[in-house]
């Protein structure tokens, strides 16, 4: 199959690809064998390190499930706030009015430039100094605030890139039938841009879930990864605990991306899409003006 961006490989290229794949599989197998050998030497593969996750329900009821629920709580609340806020800022950046476009663009670029961990730390310090929040809920509020500020700015660029990826004829046709800018955005551009920006948006939602771990390591939020310390202290199985926690993260994020893939398929069937897809690189190019 040949496209504008990809040429079908010939016989020699196919042979090279098979060789490269074989070498990669061998190297991966050797790396895995080496890692398992080291774990075996340190007694990390002993049954008593792993069986508690099967035989002792207290690990799940006391540590893993509460930690997962805290992760989901922080992540979902941040998503619910960041998505509409980011969409509004993305639309604001497309405004014809400079008094709207410039301030919104400044806010977006400002929060995109600051590491999300720093935003969480600033938020925690702000809540300590200026609010009566107790120490029990302060880490959750600080993590959500940092996630919302950073990811809303990123989502704003995703929305802007999604709209700009549409053909100019969409806007021209809307103007030709007398639609105002707001009507064109709501009824024509945004519905078509949703399918284009959905992959990048889902990637950002996965990032939100994973970044909740920063709050556990720095601010003391009782999220999933932070439970590693308590489980390891009680069962002396750090490696096994990290592996199980990693598998839980993989399962949750796989469920999220699978749902998004299903939703994207439904949207493409129910609406007429332009076929454009916005990626992370597209967002960066749109932000610097190269894709406009």
Image (spheres, rainbow, N blue to C red):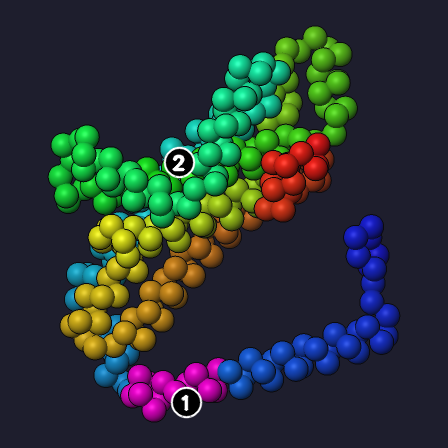
**Picture disc at residue 37:** 1
Q: Overall secondary structure of the magenta stretch?
A: helix
Q: Which residue is mark 2?
A: 149
Residue 140 visible somewhere in the drawing: yes
Q: Is residue 70 above or below residue 45?
A: above
The answer to whether the residues at label 1 and label 2 have Cβ atoms under 8 Å apart is: no
How packed mark 1 is, by other alpha carbons closer than 10 Å (few <14, some 14-19, many 20 or more), is some
Q: Which residue reaches farthest bottom? A: 41
Q: Nearer the viewer, residue 272 or 279?
A: 279
Picture residue at 61% right of the left edge, 36% below the top = 287
* SS label for mark 2: helix
Q: Nearer the viewer, residue 272 or 84?
A: 84
**Picture disc at residue 140:** none
**Which one is earlier in the sequence, the residue at label 1 or at label 2?**
1
Residue 16, percent across and down?
77, 77
Stretch of the chain drawn in magenta: 32-45
Picture residue at 16% right of the left edge, 72% below the top = 234
Residue 248, percent across and down?
36, 62
Q: Is residue 76 above or below residue 62?
A: above
* SS label for mark 1: helix
Picture residue at 56% right of the left edge, 37% below the top = 158
Q: Quadrant of the C terminus?
A: top right
**In the shown orientation, is residue 280 left or right of residue 202?**
right
How packed mark 2 is, by other alpha carbons closer than 10 Å (few <14, some 14-19, many 20 or more), is many
Q: In the rendered image, which quarter is residue 185 located in? A: top right
The nearer-to-camera label among 1 and 2 is 2
**Magenta residue check for 210:** no
- Separation of disc 1 and disc 2 at Cα? 44 Å
Q: Quadrant of the N terminus?
A: bottom right
């Amino acid at each position: 199959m040949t496209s504008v961006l990809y040429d079908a490989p010939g016989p020699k290229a196919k042979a090279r690809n098979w060789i490269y794949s074989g070498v990669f599989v061998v190297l991966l197998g050797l790396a895995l064998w080496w890692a398992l050998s080291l774990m075996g030497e340190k007694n990390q593969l002993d049954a008593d390190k792993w069986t508690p996750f099967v035989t002792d329900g207290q690990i799940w009821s006391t540590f893993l499930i509460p930690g997962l629920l805290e992760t989901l709580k922080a992540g979902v609340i941040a998503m619910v706030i960041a998505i509409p806020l980011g969409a509004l800022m993305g639309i604001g950046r497309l405004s014809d009015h400079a008094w709207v476009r410039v301030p919104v663009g400044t806010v977006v670029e400002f929060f995109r430039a600051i590491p999300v961990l720093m935003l969480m730390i600033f938020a925690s310090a702000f809540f300590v100094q200026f609010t009566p929040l107790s120490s029990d809920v302060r880490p959750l509020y600080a993590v959500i605030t940092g996630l919302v500020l950073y990811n809303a700015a990123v989502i704003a660029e995703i929305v802007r890139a999604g709209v700009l990826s549409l053909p100019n004829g969409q806007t021209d046709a809307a103007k030709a039938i007398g639609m105002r800018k707001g009507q064109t955005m709501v009824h024509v551009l945004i519905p078509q841009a949703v399918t284009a920006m959905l992959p990048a948006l889902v990637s950002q939602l996965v990032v939100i879930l994973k970044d909740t771990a920063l709050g556990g390591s720095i601010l003391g939020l009782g999220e999933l990864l932070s439970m590693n310390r308590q489980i390891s202290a009680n069962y002396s199985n750090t490696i096994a605990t990290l592996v199980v926690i990693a598998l839980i993260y993989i399962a949750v994020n796989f469920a999220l991306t699978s749902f998004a893939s299903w939703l994207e398929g439904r949207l493409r069937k129910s609406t007429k899409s332009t076929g454009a897809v916005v990626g992370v690189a597209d967002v960066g190019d749109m932000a610097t003006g190269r894709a406009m």
